Image (cartoon, grey):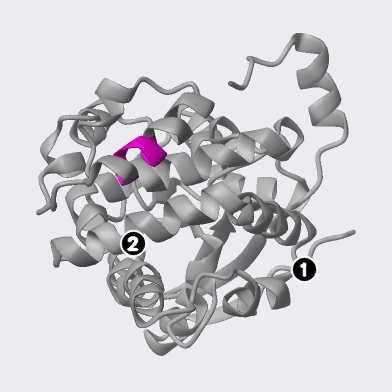
Amino acid sequence: MAQAPTSDQLQAGVRSARDRGFLWRIAKDGRESYLFGTIHIGKLEWAFPGEKVRGALMATDTLALEVDVTDPELRKRMAPGAAASGAAARAPLDPALMERIGKQLDAACLPRPRVAQLHPVMQAATLSILSARWDGLDPSFGQEIVLAGFARAAQRPIVSLESPELQMKALVPVDPAKGLLMVDQMIAQLETGKTRATLVRMGEAWAAGNLAEMENYESWCDCTRSDEERAFLKRVNDDRNPNLADRIDALHRDGKKVFAAVGALHMTGPQALPKLMAQRGYTVEPVEYTR
């Protein structure tokens, strides 16, 4: 579990702050907004934006996130037992798979009864993201949380581009049997350490601003071996992007200068957000960092 930074750590973080991730300036109707490719895990030193990202934040007036996980009402809808987290159709877990999940929950120091209220796919997804803590990458330092903290301190509005229910629909297969297969595959990846290796490589690519590595994600993630895995990746990435682009466009057309922070994989592929914004009439320009 990540610890709150000391004053010395905060001062050191500010002094050593540098730009990470992926940033684009988008312009239309005489106003500029920004797209920022994020990662949902991080380190303390990644919590301090560098000059270009900080400048983009200061030049905008609205933070747009996939879902504002700091919003108390949205957190209630995402909590174990809430409709958004567990109401999707599910097939019964066989005892062997249930015990495999239980062992992963124990290793992550998560209470079995409480997490069991989540849909099994969400249980596996939660375990997957938390496994990165063994390599010093913690969801507590994910960019969404960091940026939301900045916006709240600056008393700026935060807009969720999606609802928890919409995200749940994208993450969980409609067919319960396919959901069970997906859970089995995700737990197997955890058991072999492949999930951790993938998250570490993703974190390194994000921190270095290596967009080419992110573009080639499918070639090294070991997560597109079956039709089901390829369909899942398309559903959670490409298929969501048009709606995300429409929501960002609507905010900009409403007169807002938006800092839209969305997972870095949404900035890749045939439906990449920068491409979709260009199709909607925006001038799209990557912001180069000083390395």
Q: Is 43 placed above or below 185 here?
A: above
Percent across and percent down for residue 139 are 54, 36
Give the magenta part as a residue range.
97-101
Q: Is 98 placed above or below 223 here?
A: above
What is the distance, in whole Å, between disc 1 and disc 2 at their CAs?
38 Å
The residue labelled by disc 2 is 182
The residue labelled by disc 1 is 288
Q: Tell me: 20 left or right of 72.
A: right
Q: Tell me: 33 left or right of 287.
A: left
On the image, which quarter does residue 186 sit in?
A: bottom left
Say which label, 1 or 2, has the lower sequence index.
2
Q: Is residue 69 visible?
A: no
What residue is at 16 percent from the left and 41 percent from the top? 86
Q: Which of the two marks, 1 or 2, is nearer to us in this view? A: 2
- Residue furthest to the top: 7
Rendered-image quadrant of the N terminus: top right
Q: Amino acid at mark 1?
A: Glu
Does residue 94 belong to the magenta stretch?
no
Task: Tell me whether the residue at label 1 lies in contact with that at label 2, contact meaning CB atoms closer than 8 angstroms.
Answer: no
Percent across and percent down for residue 180 are 25, 57
What residue is at 40 percent from the left and 89 percent from the top? 279
Percent across and percent down for residue 259 are 49, 54
Percent across and percent down for residue 39 are 57, 52
Does residue 98 belong to the magenta stretch?
yes
Disc 2 secondary structure class: helix
Magenta segment, prevailing SS (helix, strand or loop): helix
